[in-house]
Amino acid sequence: MSRGPKAGGGRGQLRIIGGEWRGRKLAFPDIEGLRPTTDRVRETLFNWLTPHIHGARCLDLFAGSGALGLEALSRGASHCSFVDNSRKATAQIQGHLQTLAAADRGICQTASAISFLAGATGPWNLVFLDPPFGQDLVAPCCELLNTSDCLAAESRVYIESAAGDTPLAPGDHWELHRHKRAGNVSYQLFIVHAR
């Protein structure tokens, strides 16, 4: 859940911008600080991911509105696990999966990202890591991704953070593939190579 400006589609709505559900507008609950990743950032990210999205197994940590995971499913990902510590958020995402006739392609779990990753099995090809800003959650999540052995070979990890945060160096086997900035948001895509 990025903390930048709200995405297009009006207050409390996100818009799927590509794939099978392109143009669909979905409501998200009024939870303090919850804002979907903007359309512009999602468009750039999924342009980067185009060669890797079809058939991918995804993990949407800090899922919030579910914008990233739902976009991935719309564009051909085979499955997405949505994780958020808000029961209201995960219930809404589950409702969206039902509405989109995709309940068999996603699972929602109400948990903190840290506790989820501590017991995670995967493997995931794509991980979306978009935590609340200013809470120092990126580094411990990356450490757990490294130690839990839940990433598939050559997986992609997307990280969204405040533009002023110290750049992340998760490990020698993490290659910074793409990075960009939009306003107060910095976003990066890593390729995680086998150790």
Image (spheres, helix red, strand yellow):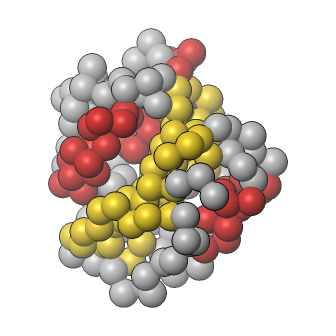
* Quadrant where the image shows the N terminus: bottom left
Estimate the x, y position of residue 64 in percent, counting from the top left.
Answer: 50, 50
Q: Is residue 10 left or right of residue 4?
A: left
* Quadrant where the image shows the C terminus: bottom right
- Number of callouts: 0
Report which quarter residue 76 is drawn in. Answer: top left
Q: Is residue 103 visible?
A: yes
Q: Nearer the viewer, residue 74 or 48?
A: 48
Q: Is residue 85 left or right of residue 64?
A: right
Report which quarter residue 15 is drawn in. Answer: top left
Estimate the x, y position of residue 77 in percent, counting from the top left.
Answer: 42, 27
Estimate the x, y position of residue 10 in percent, counting from the top left.
Answer: 22, 47
Q: Residue furthest right?
A: 119
Q: Residue furthest top?
A: 101
Could you tell me which residue is drawn at 59 percent across and 79 percent down? 136
Placement of 77 over or under 168, stated as above or below: above
Q: Is residue 49 left or right of residue 17?
A: right
Could you tell me which residue is drawn at 29 percent across and 36 percent down? 51
Estimate the x, y position of residue 187 in percent, counting from the top left.
Answer: 34, 66
Could you tell me which residue is drawn at 24 percent across and 72 percent down? 181
Report which quarter residue 6 is drawn in. Answer: bottom left
Could you tell me which residue is drawn at 24 percent across and 26 percent down? 19
Placement of 77 over or under 139, stated as above or below: above
